[in-house]
Image: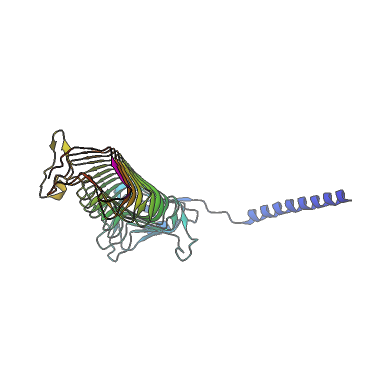
Amino acid sequence: MKRISRALVGLFVGSCSVLGLWAALCLAADAPAKPKPVTIDASKFPTLQAALDALPESGGVVMLPPGEFELKEPLVLARGDTRLAGAGDATRLVNRNEEGQPALILRGSDYPKNKKARLWRVQLANFRISGNPKSGDGVLAEGIDEIFIHGVSVDHNGGHGINLVNCYEDPRIADSIITYNAAAGLNICGGHDIVVNANHFEENLDAVVCTNSFNLCMNGNNLDDHLRHGVVIENTYGSVLSGNMIEECNGIAIILDRDCYGITISANVIAHHLGGGVDLRDAWGCAVSANTFTLVHTNSIAVGPDSGRITITGNNFCNSFVGGKDRRLKDSPNPMSRDAGTGVFLKGTADVVVSGNTFSGLDGRAVWTEGECRRLLISNNIVTDVGRRLKEKKPAIDIGAAKESVVKDNIVSEPTTP
């Protein structure tokens, strides 16, 4: 009897499953077909905004023709799975707005009121965006996941060149040139698994600002002539800056601040900065390795009292010395043309290793401290021709009264020259 009951139950369940599948197929057949992605030739529309508005929910490609297109209000792209592409610098969007409005806005039609109205997979490629001193950002992207910007020129905007706000998943900025913007060339707030690769940044206020983020991977970029800082990273962890050329900032090349941790700064050329090289203001568990610090006028590396557990190894700290003479004048009237070199400044910090570095041709000391430092290991460094601008002779390595610390096995060329 039990066997018969079980068989009946199995037959009933199987019948229900078949009926359910049949009903689902019927509903699917009756449902309207989802529109396919489309290719839109923007030259066929009265305005660029009309071309963007013609995109279906499924997205597509919008091809921008060559030409100069003046904007008095922002272009708004509100569709995901979309690529907006031009004809290189022959396609130029010119923002004539003087009320602080962006040239191009990327965001869902109901975002940020509806946080679920995020867009996925928006690409920008092969066109130029220019602004004016009173305009806003070149590109303002809000709530875009997997945004990809490549081959884009962004210049002379009154705000940020590119501003990514809560573009959380996998933002990528590559092979673009970002120049002469009044704020940051690239501003990232709230990103995760970020790639910034092979871009040019020139004469923005700051080149790159990354805050409240995770896993920035910044490699192979060229940063030059910034009016303030090069790279500013705050409240971000698990990141790497490697293989970048960072030159001639009026401020500091790289700043880590506000609860940064687990960040590696490696194999960069950090050259000709008036305000400093790497400033670890609030950074923990970070490595600064295999960089070249040349012609840095103030503190090639500074580790502040809110930072610790830092490894500084394998770097070269130098001036313009080449084969027996300095290539630059010691007292040139132009600071950017002046010979200079600086070392490592440790202020009230703890658990810092400074090992395997070369210090040469420096204005002051190689390593020195201020405030109460603890657990410093300064070893296996080569120090030569330092103290060139000091008014009185001082030790090349001077850690003061740092507690639980060791200074050993350094090769120091004496005397340091006043």
Q: Quadrant of the C terminus?
A: top left
Residue 305 visible in image: yes
Residue 387 at x, y percent in the picture: 16, 45
Residue 248 at x, y percent in the picture: 21, 48
Q: Quadrant of residue 47?
A: bottom left
Q: What's the magenta region?
A: 403-408
Whether the magenta-drawn stretch holds residue 406 is answered as yes
Whether the magenta-drawn stretch holds residue 11 is answered as no
Q: Against 316, is 204 above or below?
A: below
How is the model colour-coded?
Answer: rainbow
**Looking at this view, is 363 or 133 the one in front?**
363
**Looking at this view, is 121 or 33 the one in front?**
121
Identity of the residue drawn at 24% across and 55% down: 228
Residue 379 at x, y percent in the picture: 29, 40
Left-right relation of 61 to 202 = right
**Looking at this view, is 247 or 342 the one in front?**
342
